[in-house]
Image (tube, coloured by chain):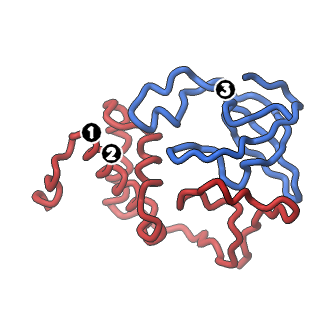
Amino acid sequence: MSFEQGQRVRVASREHRGHHRTPGYLKGRVGTVERSHGSFTNPETRAYGESGLPEKELYLVRFEDGHLIYADIYEHWLEPQ
Amino acid sequence: MRVAAVPSFPDRPYDARVERAPHDTGGRPTTERIDRTDHELDDWELLTDALVGALGRAGVMNVDELRRGIESMPPAEYERASYYERWLYSVETILSEKGVLEPGELEARL
């Protein structure tokens, strides 16, 4: 799924036992897509010796719950809000 | 010394259903100060960095595998280990998994 700049998104609040780069403290939080970084191999499969393909789009997302936080979140961890 | 800023979301606490590995420390409440002092790297630390770089370029092991190996450390060991000790732990884990290192091979050479 692809997202537009300025779109409100929620970070999926799902359990994922394996390697993934979505920070736990952002799971379930709503933020705003700042921009796309482009597409990259998926660390969740590449961490197990696979190719990491297909590539996944990586977004810079802004969170403003008290603190201003910017985080890079892969598309498959984002849900339209 | 200043205490690290910790993100706080008092009205929507972290979803406790989602388990977090020991490395995933962002946003955890703490009163501990972050040690920001620099230190000279020892030779073994430089060699560890070079080893991981070489393994990556040779296509033996990638950075995502390196991270997974680090995250798989038992929490107490993870907390105790230094930065490059975690790298070494991971290299041993991943190379053993791939059969590049035979069981006991490292110990036999030390």
* On screen, residue B28 above or below B89: below
> What residue is shown with label 1?
B98
Callout 1 secondary element: loop
Q: Position of residue B77 (x, y in %)?
A: 41, 68
x and y, in percent, of residue A40 in the image = 58, 27
Q: To which residue does mark 2 refer? A: B94
Label 3 sits on what residue type? Answer: Glu
Residue annotated with mark 3:
A57
Q: Secondary structure at mark 3?
A: strand
Say which chain is blue.
A
Which residue is found at the position 78% from the left and 39% from the top? Answer: A61
Image colour for chain B is red
Which sits in the foreground, B33 or A26? A26
Residue at the (63%, 24%) spot, across then down: A39
Q: Nearer the viewer, residue B60 or A76?
A: A76
Rendering coords of residue B110 (x, y %): 14, 62
Report whether mark 3 lies on the same chain as mark 2.
Answer: no
| Callout 2 touching callout 1 (CB < 8 Å) | yes
Disc 3: which chain?
A
Q: Along the line of sight, which residue is nearer the eye, B8 or B41?
A: B8
